[in-house]
Amino acid sequence: MKKAKQKVLCGADVVSRDGFDFIGRCGLITNHTGVLRDLSSTIDMLKEKCNLVALFGPEHGVRGDFQAGEAVSSYTDRKTGLPVYSLFSDSTEESEKALASLDTVIFDIQDVGARFYTYAYTMTDAMKLCAENGMKFVVLDRPNPIGGLKAEGTLLDRRFSSFVGRFPTPTRCALTIGEFALMMNETESIGCDLTVIPMEGWKRDMYFDDTDLCFIQPSPNIPTVDTAFTYIGTCIFEETNLSEGRGTTKPFEMIGAPWLDSKAVIEAVGTQNGVILRECSFTPTFSDYKDTFCYGIQLHVTDREVFSPFAVGIRLLDAIKKTHTELVIEPDIAKLLGNDEIFNDNFDAEEFIEYENKRSAEWQTLSEKWYLY
């Protein structure tokens, strides 16, 4: 029997219903996922609830219409007439100056639950600026689309801290964006005047499609909830000479290259819990191997409860490394993995997975202090 959808109010819905005492001049960090249950914009709601004077966009922009890594210049939002400042550009000096002129900064963006997803660091960077300038910071909480029960992956080594992994957290942290803000504010000694508006109705064992909310893809290459799951394991292929499926209808659910022996890799990896690995082919319309036929492997998620995307991603990379001399692993993969163990001559994938997942489980126990649900 199909499980009934659970009614969930996000933080923005709670504010829309109950109001909130926003102080002074307010700015909103948001994008196209900042919507209420009826899909009306948080921007429009907050224009009525507070003195909203500026908008700030993360990677992909306020409307979500820029590709990964694409710099965005400041502009005026045509719908509202509000100035829009980019927090993901070659120079953020103008944006930071605009932020520092406010009294309250509000954050409302849908995260995906992966350490290398940049929205969380847009948030924590703004929190630091607020702490330095005595401003208030308010997070309107949203679901972790891949649930709040299972952390997995590596704990980032601070030597590899970057905008795709700032803090020593697991690859999959099992926190909502609001819980992440609370934990980092304390453990990283950010110390900003932080308020999180919790959701109503969300529970830790819920995936996004267990809620009655509409899933809006958080960025151009995360179109579905299953993509958010596989992304935990396949994002690391961004720093190899394989395609991670960008430029196809299944980004991060497929990997491939013109030289890949899909069958050999699948046989080497073997049967995996909660996912079926299938030989496939694809021709990306942009990004790596644009307009080039690729032999690939598609990940079909069959059971989210037992699927461990991080482990599957590592096993795939290790199998390709052992079966293909064509594989190139870029040094920056250490930023995504959180360490450089993959480059060790005696790298053992199973030992690596077991050791890092044990550390993630210990971290998760510590993180329970900041649970809101």
Image (tube, rainbow, N blue to C red):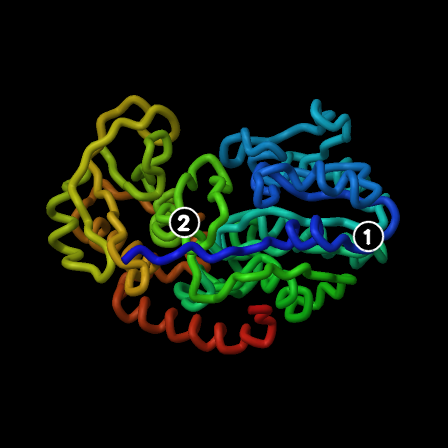
Give the distance between the C-alpha atoms of the residues marked 1 and 2, in whole angstroms.
Answer: 33 Å
| Camera-side residue of 360 and 319 | 360
In the rendered view, would you say 107 is above or below 54? below
In the rendered view, would you say 181 is above or below 235? below
**Which quadrant of the figure has residue 205?**
bottom left
Check disc 1: other Cα within 10 Å, few if <14, some if 14-19, many if 20+: some
Q: Earlier in the sequence, mark 1 or mark 2?
A: 1
Check disc 2: other Cα within 10 Å, few if <14, some if 14-19, many if 20+: many
Indicate which disc residue 74 carries.
none
**Which quadrant of the figure has residue 70?**
top right
Q: Which residue is drawn at the image coordinates 65% and 50% (left, top)?
A: 12
Q: Residue 269, how many percent across, how many down?
A: 17, 56
Image quarter where the C terminus lies is: bottom right
Horizontal arrangement in the rendering, residue 56 relative to residue 256 (left or right): right
Whether label 1 touches label 2, CB < 8 Å: no
Q: Which residue is drawn at the image coordinates 44% and 61% (left, top)?
A: 206
Amino acid on which disc 2 is placed: Ala
The residue carrying mark 1 is 22
Q: Residue 326, how many percent across, how many down?
A: 22, 40
Amino acid on which disc 1 is placed: Phe
Q: For marks 1 and 2, give the one nearer the viewer.
A: 1
Horizontal arrangement in the rendering, residue 277 relative to residue 370 (left or right): left
| Camera-side residue of 108 and 251 | 108
Can residue 293 be seen at all in this image of the molecule?
yes
Indicate which disc residue 228 carries.
2
Q: Residue 250, how many percent across, how many down?
A: 32, 37
Can residue 259 be seen at all in this image of the molecule?
no
